[in-house]
């Protein structure tokens, strides 16, 4: 049975997972999104059916792409909604791996709250989507995991390129599309000159072991402060920052996730100070790896590859 103290820690942990601190990547993402949305709103208010511009936010896994997009929309006054709300200014649609045009249309319809029928065509499903978007005053369409488009066949890929271009073309159903995904999608984006010209690209950069060491410790300190914790000297050194960056695969979102996991270990231990050992334990609970493959323990952690997670068959996570 969970104690009340443990439940409090879990509630605080869930809260920390929703906390967002701005960084340089967010600033660039927000700047492009704000400009395109403001321009589109101005055209809409003027009754001008001018072409909108889409935004492609690309970067490595765990870089904080989607979080940056959602926080940017929030700052612009567009809050998250759910199925059943009378107005949904934007839809966040996470694409399935089978990213055919029909599947993408069905994913959009599912986010609105309806299931596509097997016998329906991609065209008819999308007509339903546009109908409901008008009813819900949907103005922004966020397509997450857009890299799945790259794995489709030639015909589907061509249809999806035409679909992405159609989203920004002048019409009564005009929306601002924001596509979010891995860098691989750029291959699709630049394969069609018209598509490339219609979408502004923002590449979320990886963290640098040279430039971002100070920000790494500052980020940990911000999250620790939210939990009422202080930092031990063992997590304020250059060596620790380098280990945290490496463990995070140099992705901001992953770094934040590890920091929050370590804070949780600290709170469960009843400690008021977060130490290196909390990071060691948090990482081990994730990877269940031998000490030599734990970047917070290993002497030669720089030589560990992100995929190195040899499992000790005699050890089980608790």
Image: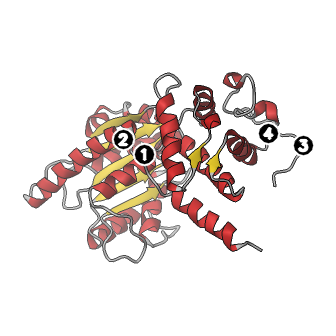
Choose the circle earlier in sequence order: 4 or 3: 4
Mark 4 neighbour density, 10 Å: few (under 14) some (14–19) many (20 or more): many
Number of the label disc, if any, that sits on residue 289: 4
For this orientation, the residue located farthest to the left is 46
Residue 170 location in percent, x, y?
Answer: 18, 52
Choose the circle earlier in sequence order: 1 or 3: 1
The Cα atoms of the two marked residues, 1 and 4, are separated by: 32 Å
Residue 35 location in percent, x, y?
Answer: 21, 45
Choose the circle earlier in sequence order: 2 or 4: 2
Is residue 207 at least partly visible in the picture?
no
Q: Residue at x 28, y 49 (%)?
A: 166
Instruction: Report which residue position mark 1 lands on.
Output: 180
The Cα atoms of the two marked residues, 4 and 3, are separated by: 10 Å
Judging depth in this view, the residue of 18 and 82 nearest the camera is 18
The reply to whether discs 3 and 2 touch (Cβ–Cβ < 8 Å) is no
Name the mark nearer the viewer: 1 or 3: 3
Choose the circle earlier in sequence order: 1 or 4: 1
Instruction: Name the secondary structure under disc 2.
Output: strand
Among the 4 quarters of the image, the one containing residue 201: top left
The Cα atoms of the two marked residues, 3 and 2, are separated by: 42 Å
Instruction: Report which residue position mark 3 lands on.
Output: 313
């Amino acid at each position: 049975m969970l104690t009340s103290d443990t439940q409090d820690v879990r509630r605080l942990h869930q809260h920390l997972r929703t906390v967002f601190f701005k960084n340089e990547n967010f600033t660039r993402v927000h700047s492009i999104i704000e400009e395109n949305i403001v321009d589109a709103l101005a055209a809409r208010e003027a009754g001008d059916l001018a072409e909108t511009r889409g935004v492609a936010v690309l970067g490595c896994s765990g870089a904080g792409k989607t979080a940056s997009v959602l926080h940017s929309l929030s700052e612009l006054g567009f809050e998250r909604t759910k199925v059943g709300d009378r107005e949904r200014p934007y839809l966040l649609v996470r694409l399935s791996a089978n990213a055919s045009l029909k599947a993408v249309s069905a994913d959009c319809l599912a986010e609105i709250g309806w299931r596509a029928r097997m016998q329906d065509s991609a065209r008819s499903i999308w007509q339903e989507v546009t109908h409901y978007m008008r009813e819900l005053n949907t103005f922004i369409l966020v397509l997450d995991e857009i890299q799945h488009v790259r794995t489709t066949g030639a015909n589907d890929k061509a249809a999806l390129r035409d679909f992405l271009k159609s989203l920004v073309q002048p019409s009564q159903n005009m929306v601002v599309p924001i596509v979010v995904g891995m860098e691989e999608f750029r291959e699709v984006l630049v394969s069609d000159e018209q598509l490339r010209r219609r979408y502004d690209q923002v590449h979320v950069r990886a963290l640098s072991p040279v430039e971002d060491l100070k920000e790494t410790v500052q980020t940990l300190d911000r999250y620790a402060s939210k939990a009422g914790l202080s930092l031990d000297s063992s997590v304020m050194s250059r060596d620790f920052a380098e280990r945290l960056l490496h463990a995070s695969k140099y992705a901001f979102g992953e770094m934040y996730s590890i920091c929050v996991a370590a804070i949780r270990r600290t709170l469960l231990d009843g400690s008021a100070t977060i130490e290196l050992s909390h990071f060691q334990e948090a990482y081990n609970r994730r990877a269940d790896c031998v000490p030599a493959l734990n970047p917070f323990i290993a002497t030669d952690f720089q030589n560990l590859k992100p995929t190195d997670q040899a499992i000790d068959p005699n050890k089980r996570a608790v």
